[in-house]
């Protein structure tokens, strides 16, 4: 579970809040285009690996004595590499070009897709499709709300960000407690937090697009912030999906 809030720290003047210029609409459309492209890349790699035992064998090794399988070095790299990509994109933002950020974003989506192949092998196809559709509906509704609302969601976003930190801490604690009840509560609260963050993130991106339109943000910085924004929306959606799957997903026999 992760959420990149780097782009939300970019300051613009309050005169751009809730602006609805043509460029702002185009800006949001481009952000969603990159988000959907990343989701498409993740889906392709997830299906490719889940349906290819020959590819999956690169991610784990089999004990010749017990016959048990466990992740090998490459498998662990695939599991933890996405965090590294997010950190690079966030902390090296000023030094990277928009093209470099796009390349990192697509590579991140591909590696994420490989790790998601384990989900396709664990949960039934019907539950994966149902949770994905539910996540898409929830995400879509909140995205529209974030784009159309006249209310400034800044304070709301700060509360949700603190809630996200609390969820991460609770998940770390539950790794040791292994409480099913606590895990269920974390998932329920997590869905609420990420759906709320979706509205907040979309409004922030709308305001950044307006900032570019009014010249308060340079076009170059606007493009890069748009890529980070697409990453953040991607993470919002993925986390909603994974948490719904944890709550309602049916495992294969």
Image: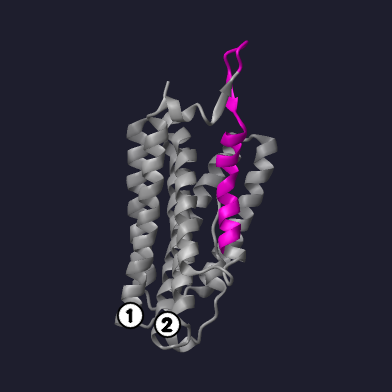
Residue shown at 52%/51% (left/top)?
190
> Which one is earlier in the sequence, the residue at label 2 or at label 1?
1
Q: Position of residue 183 (x, y in %)?
A: 57, 40
Residue 197 visible, this angle: no
Q: Position of residue 109 (x, y in %)?
A: 45, 50
Q: Along the line of sight, which residue is nearer the eye, 246 or 228?
A: 228
Q: Which residues are magenta?
A: 63-89
Q: How far apart, in angstroms, are the residues tagged by discs 2 and 1?
A: 8 Å
Q: Position of residue 1 (x, y in %)?
A: 55, 49
Q: Which residue is tagged 2?
A: 212
Is residue 138 inside the magenta stretch? Answer: no
Residue shown at 37%/83% (left/top)?
19
Relative to 17, residue 79 above or below? above
- Pointer 2 and pointer 1: residues touching (CB < 8 Å)? yes
Residue 145, disc: none
Q: Which residue is tagged 1?
A: 23
Q: Element under label 1?
A: helix
Q: Element under label 2?
A: helix
Q: Position of residue 138 (x, y in %)?
A: 36, 54
């Amino acid at each position: 579970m992760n959420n990149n809030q780097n782009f939300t720290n970019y300051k613009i003047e309050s005169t751009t809040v809730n602006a609805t210029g043509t460029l702002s609409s185009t800006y949001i459309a481009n952000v969603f285009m990159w988000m959907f492209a990343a989701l498409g890349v993740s889906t392709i790699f997830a299906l490719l690996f889940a349906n290819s035992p020959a590819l999956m064998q690169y991610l784990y090794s089999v004990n010749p004595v017990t016959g048990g399988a466990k992740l090998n070095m490459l498998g662990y790299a695939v599991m933890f590499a996405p965090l590294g990509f997010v950190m690079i994109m966030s902390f090296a933002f000023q030094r990277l070009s928009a093209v470099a950020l796009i390349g990192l974003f697509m590579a991140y989506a591909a590696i994420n897709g490989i790790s998601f192949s384990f989900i396709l092998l664990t949960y039934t196809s019907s539950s994966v499709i149902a949770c994905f559709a539910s996540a898409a509906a929830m995400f879509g509704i909140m995205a529209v709300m974030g784009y159309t609302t006249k209310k400034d969601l800044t304070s709301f976003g700060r509360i949700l960000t603190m809630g996200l930190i609390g969820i991460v801490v609770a998940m770390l604690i539950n790794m040791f407690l292994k409480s099913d009840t606590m895990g269920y509560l974390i998932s329920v609260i997590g869905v609420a937090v990420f759906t709320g963050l979706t509205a907040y993130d979309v409004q922030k991106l709308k305001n950044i697009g307006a900032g570019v339109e009014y010249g308060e943000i340079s076009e170059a910085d606007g493009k890069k912030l748009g890529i980070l924004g697409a990453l953040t929306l991607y993470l919002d959606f993925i986390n909603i999906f994974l948490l719904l799957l944890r709550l309602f997903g049916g495992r294969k026999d």
